Image (cartoon, rainbow, N blue to C red):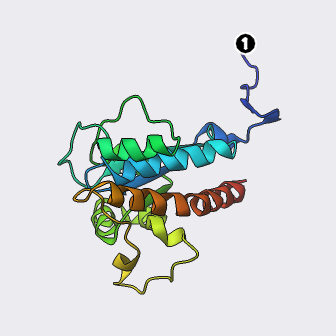
Amino acid sequence: MRGAAPRIPKRRGRAVKKHEAHPYTVMTVCTGNICRSPMGEVILRHEFEQRGLGGVVRVESSGVSDEEYGNPIDPRAVKVLKERGYAIPAKHFAHRITRNEIADTDLFLPMTASHMNALLHMLPLSKRGEVHMYRSFDPDLPDPQPGYESEIDLVDPWYGGMREFETAIDQIEAVAPYIADYVERQLEARG
């Protein structure tokens, strides 16, 4: 109807705030986008859905390299995710983070210090404050001193076996609630 106010979508029986029409975007980042970052994407998406924020927060993943371009999630990562009851995306297309993704992302979560450094070189200055290492949200880990961020790297399961994938998923799951808490505070601050 011409001249009518735009309809505001509803979420759980209440009006959705304006900023919720444009989802807050979280980007998990690893090397090739086939192990750690897709595992983080799946687990964080589940965490936000459990909190009723699935329509408000969008979670995506990418890599800092295009070496795995087009590949699906590593089968070992799929196995540990399924064993823990997570829904696996029907399609996953490994890729290097794009300019559009950079522009649309509100929170970047690199899995290691080397991913963080590579990402920082790709980002405009205005986006660099939105980069936080994934495990930096773990309250049980000490804050790394500048230059020692690798002390909180998420384990790289690629060269290992199922034990390394179990360790990686344990680390990702342990921190997911704290990241979700942070994002909820960011959403509240947006008003």
Residue 19 is at least partly visible in this image: no
- The amino acid sitting under disc 1 is Met
Q: What residue is disc 1 on?
A: 1
All told, the count of numbered labels is: 1
In the picture as drawn, the residue positioned furthest to the top comes out as 1
Place residue 75 in its image quadrant: top left
| Residue at 76% from the left image edge and 20% from the top image edge | 4
Residue 153 vertical position relative to residue 54 in the rendered view, above or below: below
Residue 42 vertical position relative to residue 9 in the rendered view, above or below: below
Q: Residues within 10 Å of mark 1 (few under 14, many from 20)?
A: few
| Residue at 27% from the left image edge and 43% from the top image edge | 95
What is the x, y in percent for residue 2?
Answer: 71, 14
Give left or right: position of 127 versus 174. Answer: left
What is the x, y in percent for residue 70?
Answer: 23, 36
Residue 185 vertical position relative to residue 41 in the rendered view, above or below: below
| Residue at 34% from the left image edge and 84% from the top image edge | 147
